[in-house]
Image (spheres, grey):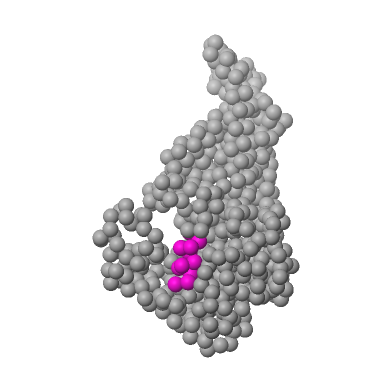
Amino acid sequence: MDTRDHPPADTPTVGPWAARWELAQPWVSLLARLGLAGVLGFAAYTKRIPELSIESVEAYQLFPPAVAEFIGYTLPLFEFALALLLVVGLATRYVAAVSGLLMIVFIAGIISAWARGLTIDCGCFGTGGEVTPEETRYGLDIARDVGFLALAGIVMVWPRSPFALDRLFGLYR
Amino acid sequence: MGKASRQAARERIRQERIREQKRAKRNRVLMVVGAAAVVVLLVVGVGYLFMNRGGPGPDREELYAALPEQTVQQDGSVVVAGEDVSAPVVEVYADFQCPACQRFEEGESGAELLEMAGDGEAIVHYRPVSIFAQRQAPLSTNSLRGAAAARAAAEHGEFVEYADILFNNQPAEGDAGFAPDDLKEWGADVGIESAEFTERIDSEVEVADQYSDYYQQLVSAAQDSLSEEELSSTTMPELMEWGDEQGIDSSFLEGSYVKEVLDATDEANARYDGENAFTSTPSVYVNGQSVGDQAVFSASGLRSAVEDAEPGEVTTEPLASDSDAASAEDDSGQPPETEE
């Protein structure tokens, strides 16, 4: 008889550590979910003035002015929308995946600025633009974004957490 | 019906049920992801519309009509203040080639300042600078041409109107713009019909081009004969003085508006320090206190910074309007009671 299709829940093979993880995982995921939401929400809030946000994007010298302006307007809104979805826990796994992708894009942007010898503030939280060479801190910015990427990874791999709208729709229960 | 075929039928039904469950799960995921996508589109779309909703804002022509007199100062800056008006002094530092300055002047902030100047709620002191003067050629020359042309327009009392046209026509970074013919035409557009103005444009354009070459020469000479340490501790005026001693002549700048804006930029850099430091354009100071980046770009932020401030004093002297320009030389003395 073919048993491949049995969901894992039907055949629990629980060791002591696995049992503990089983218990802790939803709360770990909840913390990661809310932490990531906080980071994205704060990032959006600090970019709320479009003129400054556009300036941050322009500093990377990657886009033509019209595109930089569009990104300057919409990126904070996009971050806010992701934060909102993470807080309410809707499509948690997929929103976390998109947030992780966004972090990868940010990291790539910072590396590209670093590699081209630009001296800019990453503009990750509010005021970006040019700074003096001594004021750049690309390494720190990348490390921080890698940390956020890890949060996104946790939520993506273990999307099951309490207080999530997903549960109402029968997902990740 | 044999036993084997019954078993096969049961198996088919079981498989079917599993497929059914999978389909239902997939549909739930699709529905939830779809709902999330709708939320994202709504937030971004509505937010984008809301931020761009500003529309044309108050009519600039009306704001211009309500403006009090624009008085050129000895350093080439322009004070917009009604007679005997006592109000906080708002100093605006901007470069005509800087994109953020364009957004500042064309957006709600620029309009708000004009409105406050028109209502006598603020004395607005426009202090053009050239933060790009020492950069690569189209950037530097655009910046200097723009500032010099605005200064020429200020001579005719049309600084604000002319500056707005410059910002509206700001060249993209790296493109050559502010062409001499355009600069002259824009003068005519704001009602400056004077040979003096067009001649001035021609001579300033020449000086701006010359400055670009001069600066390259000065820097390469300095790099050859000065140490790294000396270079970083030398200010522009000191470097130019050094250049003159080395035979890199800066006298072509004398009497030009290009020199005025270069000096104004050096003075702005030296004027503030600490939290107040002049680090970027546009910068706005109310009674000498920086209002900060956040307030610069919000009309309400600017207004509340002005409303919280006491009446202030303009720290520059007006340029003597008659030909006897030799009259007042001291810039550092007591600020004048708003005089005409």
Q: Quadrant of the N terminus of chain B?
A: top right
Magenta part, dominant SS: helix
With B308 as the anchor, is B251 left or right in this view? Answer: left
Q: Residue at the right extreme? A: B119
Q: Is residue B134 magenta?
A: no
Rendered view: B51 above or below A85 = below
Examine the rendered structure and indicate whether residue B215 appears above or below residue A32.
Answer: below
The magenta span reads B259-269
User: Could one spot residue B169 in this view of the protein?
Assistant: no
Residue located 48% across and 78% down the image: B179
Q: Position of residue B62 (x, y in %)?
A: 72, 73
Nearer-the-camera pick, A81 or B177: B177
Q: Quadrant of residue A51?
A: bottom right
Magenta stretch: residue B261 in it? yes
- The image shows a total of numbered marks equal to 0
Is residue B321 something that shows in the picture? yes
